[in-house]
Every structure is written in C-alpha cells, then in structure tokens.
Amino acid sequence: MTHVPALLARTADFDWRSFVASPLCWALLAGAVGIWLMLPGGGSRVRVAGSLIAAVGLGLLGSLLPQLGDLSTQILFWILAGLTAISAVATISMRSPVYCAIWFALTLLTTAGLFLLQGAQFLGVATMVVYAGAILVTFLFVLMLAQPEGHAYYDRISWGRFAPAVATIAAIIIVGGLTHILTNLDEHSLPHAAAAAVNENRVIHEQHVAKLGGQLFSRHLVSVEVAGTLLLVALVGAIAIVIQGKEKRATDAQARQMAASPGGSSDA
Amino acid sequence: MPDELALLQNYLVVGAILFAVGLIGFLVRRNMIVMFLCAEMMLQGVSVSLVAWGRYHNDWGGQMLTIFIITVAACEAGIGLALILMLVQASGRLDIAFWQDVREEGQPAFVDHAVPEERAEDRVWPRLTPSGIEPVVDQDELSHRSRV
C-alpha cells in the first residue's frame, strides 16, 4: 500500500519544540490532568476542578479540528461531539453505578445523533432502540439485583495510584497520536474520497434503509446467519449459566443441611 | 472533496476520545458493571470510526460491521451479566478485587490500604415528590375489621 509509508513519513519529522508550543500538547495535558482528578479517589472539590480543567482541554482539542462545510453541520457536530466527550468522562467518574449507566445512555444518544449526521439512518435508530433501549436496561436490571444500598466502598477507590495515572497516559497517547497525524495530513496522504453521486449502491441514498437491507441480505448473508446463531447460543448459554448456578446453590444448601444435622435425616 | 476529509478527521477524533475514555474507565474502576459499561463505550468508539470510514470510502462495510457490533454487544451483555450475577451471589458484592486470586502467578496481591470514609455531604439521595391523593383512612377500620 503506497499510502501507509506516506502517513508514517509525516511523523518522522517530529519536532519536540514545536510540539510543546502547539495547542495539541496543552490540550492533551489539560485533558489528562482533568480526567485524572475526576477519577474516583478524590474529594468533591477536586472533581469540580478536574471537570473545569478537562473542559478547557476539550475546547483546545476542538479548536484544532478542521472546519466542516456549512455552519449548521458545524454547530450540530460541535454540540453532539462535545456532549459525547462530556458524558463519556462523566460515565467513568460517577460514584454511583446507576448514574454511570444513565450517563452512558446519554453517550449512546449523542452517538446516535452523530450516526444520523453521517447519513447512517438505520444505525442511528438501531443504536437508540437496541443499545440504549435494551442492553442498557438489562444493565440497570442487574444493578437493581446486585448493587448494595448506598454508595459502596469499591466505587470510591481504585487500584492504588499507579493504575489511574498510567491509564490516563495511555489514553492521551492514543488520542494525541491520532490527532497529531490527522491534523498534519496533506492532500495526498489518504486516498481520495470516492466520488459521490452517481453509483446506485452509494451509501448516501434516498432509500438508504432499503439499500442497506439489500446489501445486508445479499453480500453479507452468511454473517447475518452466523450472528443469528450467535444470538441463539448466547441465549441458551445465559439460561444454562443461571440454571447451573441455581443447582449448585441447591446442592450446597443440601450439603450444609446434611452436615448440620448429626447423622443425617433418617426419615427424609 | 475537502469537506469529506474534514468530516472524516473530526469523526475519527471523536471515536478515539470515546475509545480512550472507555480504556481509562475499564482499567480504573472496580465495579464489575461499570467495567462492562466502559467496554461497551470502547465498542461505541470503534463504531463511530467505522461509520466515518464507510462514508468516506462510499463502502457499506462500515455500517454492516457496526450492525454486527451491536449484535455481538447484546450477546456479550447477556452472558456477561449472567456471569456477574453468579459472582455476586457467591461473593455478595460487585467488587472485582474480591476475585483477585485468579491473577497471574508471581503477581503480588492488591491490598486496600485505606478506604476513605464517605463524607456526610456526599450522602445525598434523589427525592421523589409525593404524588397522588392520600386515601381517607377510617380509624375504626384500622383497628377492627367489620367485614371480612
């Protein structure tokens, strides 16, 4: 592939001084410090300061991205993408896991909006209906069954001091590296966007969902069948796990009862 | 067309942010369900990138793979939550550090040094406004049932 060496060649001339002076470095630093302060383990005042610093970092990062075509698209994208980032960080920093689930529902809604902005109509609605409407509700049901009353201790602490710091550093390397490459591209690094209008099988289409159904059941038929089998297997597996767990608990209870009554029950 | 490239660049950064924040959450949190939510967030970041690339290359494969990601996430949620429920019934808590005996050999155990006490001002619970009309209660009926 002739495009990969072009992408990598841009990162060979990485100048430390120009990087430190660029807003990308400060955006990443502010984001990292802000998120690290918001992670569980700190007091409430620390979290508010962390959220402000992270918001500044997000603004700096947003200023680096290229402008979209018209103003309405730009404003919509800023609202949706900003809300996505804010609710993602809120998901990982809440003390109560139910609040985490609700913030994650907001992340899913904004991601569905981003899908709609791309013209992926079916995916936007499918994310809302299936992901936020079924999978997330299942999470909330399990939280209802398993979460103890009040704030649990394991929601307020983490794995010492090492894990949050190293995880934050790894995350800003991912985001920073990708943003650095993407904002320093020239016109020849990526293959050109495929010419839009004329093809009958183009993705942006008036009958988008009909075309998607056509593609799904003609080109990707085997994958659909495999996915159906996977769903069946998952259903059977989940029920089997629960039944086996119930049987195990019944036999454990029986064993404890036999051990408790001396000599066993002779008339059972 | 520069507009398509700008759209792609913006969306890839959003996908990277979602993935990275999910990564932080998975490595930092100890609640099993919140770790699961962060894994789902990583999948969502990948979906955003896939849809962006699909539009850029005018290829249906991005959206197809996203449909299958949603399917696999549903299966994974079903089985994973069943397993989590079994673990909760065995241990009584959602803390994953309880099960750290399955770690690698040679790794030292993680010991909680000091769990900070929850401050009084953090103990706030949402209050629901009472709704409806309070029923009229007959005091005689409360003490003695006249009809069965």
Image (cartoon, coloured by chain):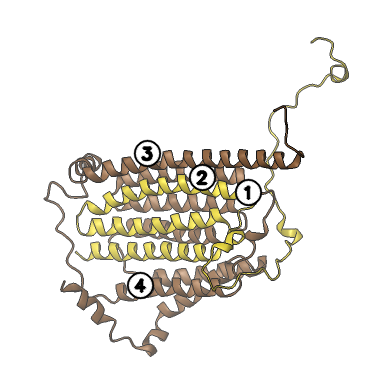
Chain colours: A brown, B yellow
Dot 2 lies on which element?
helix
- Mark sitting earlier along the chain (1/3): 1
Q: Are labels 1 and 3 on one chain?
A: yes
Query: Which of label 4 and label 3 is nearer to you?
Result: 3
Q: Nearer the viewer, mark 1 or mark 3?
A: 3
| Circle 3: element type | helix
Q: Which residue is mark 1?
A: A147
Along the horizontal axis of the image, is A253 left or right of A188?
right
For residue B80, side relative to residue B53 (left or right): right
The answer to whether residue A82 of the structure is visible from this angle is: yes
Tell me the crowding category of disc 1: few under 14, some 14 to 19, or many 20 or more residues within 10 angstroms, Cα based: many
> Label 3, on which residue?
A232
Cα–Cα span, label 3 and label 2: 15 Å
Query: Does the CB distance between marks 4 and 2 fall below 8 Å?
Result: no
Is the Cβ of the residue at disc 4 closer than 8 Å to that at disc 1? Answer: no
What's the CA distance linking mark 4 and mark 2? 39 Å
Q: Compare residues A75 and A59 and report the one nearer the observer.
A: A59
Task: Name the disc covering residue B82, or none.
Answer: 2
Q: Which mark is residue A179?
A: 4
Provide residue B95's location: percent of width, then percent of height.
61, 57
Q: CA distance from mark 4 to mark 1?
A: 39 Å
Where is residue B49? Give x, y as percent.
32, 60
